[in-house]
Every structure is written in structure tokens, then in C-alpha cells.
Amino acid sequence: MKPGFQDDMLAWWVDSGDTSHVCKDLKWFEEFEPVEGLNASIKKYFGNTPKSSIETPSSSPYANENNNKRSREEVEVSEDEIVGGQNSRHNHARVQFELFKDQRHNLDNVLSQQCKQDEIVYRVRLTAVVDVFRFLLKQGLAFSGHDESISSNSRGNFLELIKWYCERNDEVNKAFNSKSHGNNQLTSPKIQKEIVNACAAEVRKIIVNEIKDKFFSILIDESRDCSIKEQMAVVLRYADDVGEVIERFVGVVHVTDTCASSLKSAIDNFFAKNNLTMSKVRGQGYDGASNMRGELNGLKQKILAENKCAFYIHCFAHQLQLVVVATSSEYASVSSFFDYLTKIVNIVGASCKRKDLIRQKQHDNFVKRIETGEVCTGKGKLGVAYMYRCLDPRDSFQTFDREKLLRLAELYSDDFSGFELGQLRIQLDWYISNMKSNEVFFGLLDIGELAKKMVQMKYHITYDLVYRLVELALVLPVATATVKISFSALKFIKTDLRNKMGDNFLTYALVCYVEKDIFENVENEAILQRFQAMGPRRC
């Protein structure tokens, strides 16, 4: 060490005899002094000692032997601990360096490779479980069995299908029989519920993404299941990107009572969980019960208080039923007609041949009416409320009335500003002129076909305000038939033998069962990723 190096703040290299020590912190030179009297190996490792521990005479910092003796006492370490011993720092550094050079046999690398292999096996096992779940959910079958022990001959649909899968796929068989995964077989009830939850969540995600910022209506009904629980089914009605009306079942909610406040609270919670907003609701469809359509405290009124554009439509099928009942009680001839009708149904129903005969007659009659255009087919194509009949394209838009459509747009004050109402007046004139002169729009039978044809011809961009009216007409609920269908599925999923099914598992299974067409298009990868994100997993 050269004397006076403390004064040179640019010194970066410190010569210790056999090697050089690098220090990039210049403050280090002010706090440490060189240690004399130790061999080169100790100096090589320790370098310097703090200045505070050394009393340096004014003549020379290295002249006092007592100073060196005190320094040697303060640094009590043997040369063997530094370079010669088995557990020395030198040997430890050497071993680490050799392992770094031999990456193939490095323990960290071996463990990493083993972990990757376990991940591959885990993924094969999880994918097989999801495939089995897909089959059971689409068929509405039970998962568990009465006796799932290893000695049982019938361990339930899920475990038996896993066994069947393993017998026909060697890769899956190796994954399930691998000793490395221990008890991580992905067959526990908790894992089953989480995977079913992931499946239903992906289906709902697709439905919500289809709606995006579009207008939609809600259709709600209540019914009891086999365990005497009141279940509220929720269906969303909207027009997709091609102008087709779609009604999607999104789940059932268990309600402790059927008062309007409880139903409104359940709807709000359901909307919050599924990223839906009440501000986009443009229609409500119920069966006409007092707790639903009450003018003061009904569910209809509570939603209207929050969104004045969510117009209520009494289910048309239920209205027809009420009309028939009321007419039968007032007119004896109508009552007699239904009495005879009941007898005919009983007579025909008692014979399979007579039943087949009347079914064939009804089928032929219905086909003939479809061909002549008397009736329309397709989901959601049951017409719209009478206030929208001015948009009806039949008979070359004979019922078109611009002033009525402008008054209709004024009802949707949140969707049409004052400026847009003025633009709508101009667009309606150009729209009806183009519709009546364009052969593409001849022969349309309902507003649903009109909307799809406008999207096909890009007229939903040219006449965007008119198409907004058409879309609002399409989302208005007409009947609660889709809700009734979901209750039929509920009776199939939750049976007397499965009456202990939880509310969450029930709604997850129902969403996958009712919306099979969406569920079939859900990728396995999306389900796997959502399942993994639900919590920490081990391979």
C-alpha cells in the first residue's frame, strides 16, 4: 500500500501484494486503514480495518508495534478458515463457481427440470378433468356418487368417466397414476366446484362481451325448486352485432322472500358481480304478479325510479291467459268451448295413434303458415310492443309514421339529445324513401329481419339514429318464455336425489346447461387460466 493514499480520492485500486481489491465507494478509504502484520492471504480477504479501531501515531501510521498487535487481536481469524478449511469462504466460492460452469448437473437446474415435468403432467391431468366436466355439464348429469370409495363398483359419474378416460388414453393414465403428484388428483368436491365456477364464468364473460355498451332488457320470474327454495331466474334480451335478437340465461338467485325490495337487492348484487349496469336497461319483462308490477312499491317501480327508460312490458303470453280466463267467466259459450276442448284433449291423449295423428295435422298446418308468411320462426321473433308498429316493414312499410316515431324517441330522453332529435327527423325522411325504393327490403316480415338487413347493407351506420330506434324496439321484452325454459332445466338439474345442491353450484351448472351453444365454444385454455387464478395451485 502506498503511503498517503487516503489523500488521493481518485484511487480505485488497492495493492495488497498478491492481488488487487476494487472499491467503488470512495468513502471507504476515509473509514478504513491497512492492517500490517498479517499474511498476504488475510490481507487479500479482509483488505483494511476501520480507522476508528486503530490509534495511529503522528509520525507514521505503521511504526507502532502495539498498534499492529491491537489490530491482530481485533481481527481474530485463522488462515485455514479463509482459504484452507472445508467450510471456508474460499472453498464455498469455488464450489459455486464449478456448479455455475456445470449447468446440466446443477441442483437448481435439476429441480427446475423436475418442476417443468411436473407442470406438464399436472396440465394433462387438469385438461382431462375439464373435458369430463364439459360432458357432465352439457348433459346435466350428477357428479358425485353414493359410494366413491376405491372398493366401490360405481363411484359416480365423474370418477367413473375419469377411469374410462385413463383406460383409453395412455398419457392421461400416466398423469393420474404418477406418484409425483401425491394426493393432488383434482377430484375433490372443492376442486369440482371451482372448475364448474370457471366454466360458468367464461360463459357469462362471453355474454357480457356480446352486450358491451348495447341496450338490453331483463326478464325475471320466480319459482320454487325441489328443496322448497325460492329461486329467481334472470334472462337478458339484447340485439347482437348483426341485428339479431338474443335472449340469454345468466343465472338463478336464491331469494329469502319475494318482496320487491329483496328482488331489487338481488338484481343489484347480480349486476355488480357480472359487470352489468342498470343505466343500459331499456325494458322489464315479468308475469304480472303484484310484487312485480305494483305501481307504488313493485319491482317495476323501483327500477323505474333508478332508470326512467326501463319500460315495463307485461308478458304477452300471460296477458292472453288472463284474457281467456276473464272471457270464460263472463260468457257461457266460451266456457263451454274450453270444456269441450278439455274433453278432446283427454280423448286424444288416451290413444297413441290419435295423438300421433293430431300432431301430424298440426305440423302440416304450421308448415303451411310458415310458407305463407303468417307466422315467423326463430328465437325472440315474436313481434314488439304496439308502440313500435310504425317500424314494421311489412306491406312496404305501410304503417310508417314519422311523427309517432319522433314522439317515441322523445320518451328516451337519455338516448336522444335535442340535437339528435332534429337529425332524426331528417334521417327518417331519407330512410323511408330509401326503404321503399330498394328491392333488398321488399318482403321483410318483421323488425328482426329489418335490423339484420340494415346491418348487412351498412345502413345501421348511414341511418344510425333510426337504427337506434330499431334496436330499442328489439330489446323490449315480449314474453317470459325463456325464463320458463330455465325453470324446466332447473327441475332437470336439481332433482330429489340432488336436493342438497348448493345455490352457487346450481347456478353455475344451469348456465352451462342452458347456454350450451356458448359453452361449446369456450376454449379449454380459458377455463384452465381462470381456474389457476382462483388460488395458489401446486403441481
Image (spheres, helix red, strand yellow):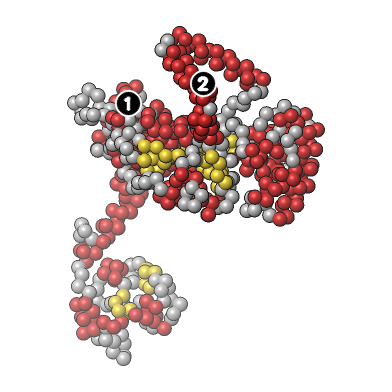
Relative image position of residue 281 (x, y in whole percent): 55, 47
**In front: 43, or 427?**
427
**Can residue 155 be seen here?**
yes
| Percent x, y of residue 158 | 31, 29
In the picture, measured across the screen, residue 330 lies left or right of residue 409, that is left
Q: State the quadrant of the C terminus.
A: top left
Instruction: Please give the count of numbered marks on the rendered protein.
Output: 2
| Residue 457 in view of the camera | no
Tag shown at residue 161: 1
* Quadrant in the rendering for residue 188: top left
Query: Residue at left 35%, top 46%?
Result: 256
- Where does label 2 land, which residue? 337
Work out whether 197 lies above or below 156. below
Q: Is mark 1 on a helix, strand or loop?
A: helix
Q: Is mark 2 on a helix, strand or loop?
A: helix
Q: Which of marks 1 and 2 is nearer the N terminus?
A: 1
Disc 1 marks a residue whose amino acid type is: Leu
- Give left or right: position of 204 versus 378: left
Q: In the displayed structure, would residue 394 be above or below residue 16?
A: above
Q: Residue at x 71, y 44 (%)?
A: 405
Please state the horizontal and vertical placement of residue 221, each as a whole percent of the image: 45, 39
Between 2 and 496, the one lying in front of the other is: 496
Task: Report the quarter where the N terminus lies.
Answer: bottom left
Count residues near mark 2 (Cα–Cα under 10 Å), then give few for <14, some for 14-19, many for 20+: few
Q: How far apart are marks 1 and 2 (CA)?
A: 54 Å
